[in-house]
């Protein structure tokens, strides 16, 4: 199962470096690989969060198509551009994608459409969500480690 976010905006950032500056301005410990130009984003975009792999898929999409396929969502208005973010069950990829999307939206004056929540978020709301996810990851990882340890020891895992 893949999870998706879309940044909808009326302008595109000019480079990965400009995007990295937006990420830095948001205060996130996320770095993006600069091997590709931002115009040629397609597929996996390597990233690191706190020094650990946090890459995700990132592609340019047609904003009208995104809005048409989600016709029940109020996007507030039409948007010119869409940048799609996709990841699987990797928690670090989740935080990487959310941080990158929130920073991109903030830098372009766009919005973030969270497909799982079915909600369009302002840059401020998206930055807050990214920070919440970042804060929850250590708790989730500790709980998963405890559950795996209990399973290995034949103990009940609880609920």
Image: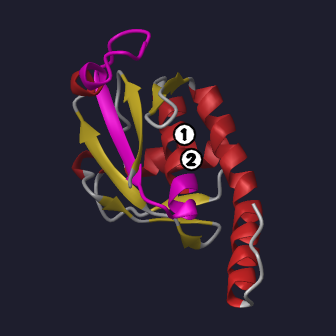
Q: Quadrant of the N terminus?
A: bottom left
Q: Which residue is more in the foreground, 43 or 117?
A: 117
Q: Is residue 112 left or right of residue 136?
A: left
Q: Residue at x 34, y 50 (%)?
A: 58
Q: Is residue 96 left or right of residue 15?
A: right
- Could you tell me residue 90's position as x and y percent? 51, 64
Q: Which residue is more in the foreground, 6 or 28?
A: 6
Q: Is residue 106 above or below residue 30?
A: above
Secondary element under disc 2, as helix, strand or loop, is helix
- Could you tell me residue 48's position as x and y percent? 53, 66
Per the rendering, the mark at residue 67 is none
- Could you tell me residue 100's position as x and y percent? 50, 47
Q: Is residue 142 above or below residue 20?
A: below
- Name the image quarter holding residue 147: bottom right
Near mark 1 (Cα within 10 A), the count class, few <14, some 14-19 or many ≥20, is many
Magenta highlight on residue 92: yes
Which residue is label 1 attached to? Answer: 103
Bounds of the magenta segment = 67-95
Q: Is residue 123 left or right of residue 81?
A: right
Magenta highlight on residue 44: no
Q: Which residue is more in the foreground, 80 or 139?
A: 139
Per the rendering, the mark at residue 99 is 2
Q: Residue at x 28, y 21 (%)?
A: 80
Secondary element under disc 1, as helix, strand or loop, is helix
- Name the image quarter holding residue 68: top left
- Res 113 seen here: yes
């Amino acid at each position: 199962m893949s999870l998706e976010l879309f940044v909808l905006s009326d302008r595109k950032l000019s480079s990965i470096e400009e995007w990295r500056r937006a990420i830095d301005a948001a205060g996130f410990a996320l770095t993006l690989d600069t091997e590709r130009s931002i115009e040629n984003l397609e597929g996996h975009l390597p990233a690191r969060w706190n020094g650990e792999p946090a890459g995700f898929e990132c592609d340019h999409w047609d904003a009208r198509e995104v809005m048409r396929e989600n016709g029940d969502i109020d996007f507030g208005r039409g948007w010119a551009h869409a940048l799609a973010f996709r990841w699987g069950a990797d928690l670090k990829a989740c935080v990487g994608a959310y941080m990158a999307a929130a920073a991109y939206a903030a830098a372009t004056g766009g919005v973030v459409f969270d497909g799982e929540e079915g909600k369009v978020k302002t840059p401020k709301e998206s930055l807050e969500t990214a920070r919440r996810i970042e804060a929850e990851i250590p708790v989730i990882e500790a709980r998963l480690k405890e559950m795996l340890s209990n399973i290995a020891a034949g103990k009940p895992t609880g609920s």
